[in-house]
Image (tube, rainbow, N blue to C red):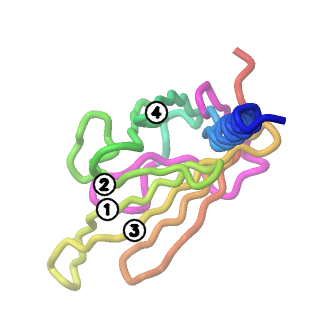
Amino acid sequence: MTKKRTSGILLSVLVLFVAARLLAQAPPDLSGTWIFVAEKSQGVPTVPRIYNTTGAPAASKDLQITQTPAAVRVKIGGVELVYRLEGPEGNISADGRAGFPVGKAAWEGAALVATLTQEVFSPADSNYIKVPIRETYTLSDGLLIVERVRTHLGGKTDTQKLVYTKSAS
């Protein structure tokens, strides 16, 4: 075998290896309409509440998700949230509403992880305190699992595990 032919074969193998790695790392597509499955969930869907980490009951429990390389948009109960994957942190309200959590999202393997901070007024401190919220979106056996860990004033945390099935339409 000639040196030139060996180099060509090695280059072809390298290109295939790199292409396979890039395809394997592509994030899952979360896009679509997702229907809440109460019997498989721990907690109920909420939308952010201004300056309060408890959230408010969602007018509709279903999610509508659109996804681009730059952001994942989630619409629930008439509220649209934007999880930015590129650029600086930002308010997750698509309308830029004051008091909503601020943060950014990133793909961690096959999971979309949003790391957020929300300002909440603390009467004890007579000031606003920033508290963390972490949301993880994963696909498992055709289900969308949304896990939300919220920290409240005083350091107490709660975790929700919300399960959704994809709408046929």
Q: Which residue is mark 1?
A: 118
**Which numbered disc flags the more N-terminal residue, 2 or 1?**
2
Residue 72 in the image: state x and y as whole percent: 47, 36
Magenta span contains residue 53: yes
Residue 156 is marked as none
Distance from Cα at disc 3 to Cα at disc 1? 6 Å
Q: Residue at x 43, y 61 (%)?
A: 54
Q: Secondary structure at mark 4?
A: loop
Magenta segment: 30-56
Which amino acid type corresponds to the residue marked 2 in the rendered image? Val
Q: Nearer the viewer, mark 2 or mark 1?
A: 2
Distance from Cα at disc 4 to Cα at disc 1? 25 Å
Quarter holding the N terminus is top right
Q: Nearer the viewer, mark 3 or mark 4?
A: 4
Please say if 64 is above or below 117: above
Which amino acid type corresponds to the residue marked 1 in the rendered image? Gln
Q: Within 10 Å of the Cα at label 3, are there few (<14), some (14-19), or many (20+) other Cα atoms?
A: some
Q: Does residue 13 appear in this view?
A: yes
Distance from Cα at disc 3 to Cα at disc 4? 25 Å
Q: Residue at x 30, y 45 (%)?
A: 87
User: Which residue, as the protein is rendered here, is positioned at the far top?
Assistant: 169
**Which numbered disc flags the more N-terminal residue, 3 or 1?**
1
Q: Nearer the viewer, mark 2 or mark 4?
A: 4
Q: Which residue is mark 2?
A: 102
Please say if 26 is above or below 45: above
Q: Which residue is mark 3?
A: 132
**Which numbered disc flags the more N-terminal residue, 3 or 2?**
2
Name the foreground residue: 153 vs 85: 85
Q: Which residue is mark 4?
A: 69
**Which numbered disc flags the more N-terminal residue, 4 or 1?**
4
Name the foreground residue: 99 vs 145: 145
**Which numbered disc flags the more N-terminal residue, 3 or 4?**
4
